[in-house]
Each structure stands twice: as structure tokens, then as C-alpha cells.
Amino acid sequence: MRSKAYWHFRIAAAYSILLAVLVAAFAAIYGKNDSFLIINKFNSPSFDYFFEYFTYLGDGMIWIPLLVYVFLYKRDFLFTIIAAFAICTLLTQFSKWVVFADALRPLGLLKNQVRMVPGVEVHSTSSFPSGHTSIAFTYALLMAFLLKRNFWTFFFPLVAFFVGYSRVYLAQHFVTDVFAGIIVGMASALLALLMYEQFKRRRKNRIAEEEKVVHV
């Protein structure tokens, strides 16, 4: 993993770790409930409108333009994108419905203390981890790998961070859920890239073997 693409991935991952540490520190200082309430109560009509739509950057549909781009310009990476999405979805959903099936969302735990944005459907169960955050960070790290530009290396993790922020602002998740989502997203991207590296190595060995046979 010494190419320019992997260097940008490492930088984006390190930046994501820093963001995760800040999120964890905020949750540790103020506690699970109060850290949520601080963000949820800091609101305005313009924030309501912005985050209502911004949060969709963590929706599963965001993968479609990336899949189209990879299909058109970098087909050997297509399996990696599909694998990253599958890993992220599996880790998130298994955690939500099996490991932490009883984890309540803010509405289910804090009830009338929760401020909800008009028009936004708020759920009350399956809180941990934040799926939108995990998708956003998986996507962000893969984009840093693909685009190999300093600006995007920092831009995409920052966008993913605010997707996580939007989940708390919209009363969908606790800050702790967002922290877990960052970890899941980073793990998903890393595992997918390790599979990509293994795929490239096997293909290179196969080509070398075929060339050896031809020369013999």
C-alpha cells in the first residue's frame, strides 16, 4: 500500500480518527444524554432546512453515482465499492438488530425532551450505530482513495462528520451512535481496500504465471 492513492487514504483515515476522538471526547465529557441535547437544542429554522436534506448524503442511494463513476472510469475498483457497501451494511445492520437490538434512540429514551424538526420522521429504536454516519465515512475514505487530491482527502471526511452531526441534530441518534458509525465506516473502507489489494496481487501473479507458460 505505497501508492499515492493509499497515501491519501491514510491521511483521510488519520483525519477521520481525529474526528472520532473529538466526538468521543464530547460524549465522554457531557455524557450520552446531555451531549445529544446540546446539539439537538442548538437549532434554527435555517439549520432545520439544511440538515433535513444534508443528512441524505449518508443515505444508501449516495452509492449510485460512485458506482456509475467507477463503472465508467475504473472498473477494476467496482468490486471494491460493492464489497465496501456490503461490509458497511452488514456490520451496521448486524449491530442494530442483533448485538444492540435493545438500544433506544433519543425519542425512545428521552421522549418529551427531544426537539424534532417538522416533517422529519423520527425513529425510536435500533439506535447503535448510526448507519448514515457509517455509510458517509466509508464513502468518504474511498473517495479520498480514488480522487487522490489533498482537498478531497480532507473535504469528504468533514462532510461525513457533518452527516453524523445531522443525525443528532435531527434527533435520530445519540453522539455515541455517531462515534460508532465512524468506526464502522473506517473499518468497512479498510477491509474493502485490503480485499482490493489481495485481488490485484492474485491477478498480477496469474498474469505472471501465464506469461511464464507462454515463454516456455
Image (spheres, rainbow, N blue to C red):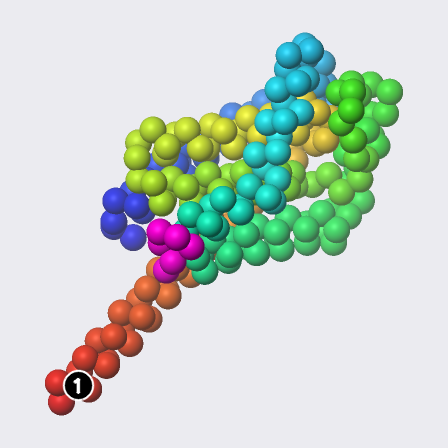
Number of marks = 1
Q: Residue at x 48, y 50 (%)?
A: 67
The answer to whether one can see residue 86 in this image is yes
Figure check: 197 above or below 128: below
Q: Nearer the viewer, residue 209 or 73?
A: 73
Main SS type for the magenta part?
helix
The magenta stretch is: 71-76
The residue that disc 1 covers is: 214
Q: Is the residue 131 above or below the residue 115 in the image?
A: below
Helix, strand, or loop for circle 1?
helix
Q: Nearer the viewer, residue 86 or 61?
A: 61
Asked if the magenta segment contains residue 176, the reply would be no
Q: Quadrant of the rendered structure where residue 94 is?
A: bottom right
User: Amino acid type of disc 1?
Assistant: Val
- In the rendered structure, does residue 72 fall within the stretch colored magenta? yes
Which residue does the image show at 31% across and 70% down from the upper left?
A: 203
Q: Residues within 10 Å of mark 1 (few under 14, many from 20)?
A: few
Outermost residue toward the front in this view: 72
- Relative to 104, does residue 19 appear above or below in the rendering? above
State the residue at coordinates (37%, 32%): 152
Horizontal side, residue 192 vs residue 91: left or right? left
Residue 120, position as x, y percentages in the image: 76, 27
Q: Quadrant of the C terminus?
A: bottom left
Q: Quadrant of residue 155?
A: top left
Q: In the image, 25: left or right of 6?
A: right
Q: Picture coordinates of residue 106 (x, y %)? A: 77, 29
Residue at point 84%, 32% (across, down): 108
Q: Position of residue 209 (x, y in %)?
A: 23, 80
Please identify the residue farthest to the right as the structure is shown.
112
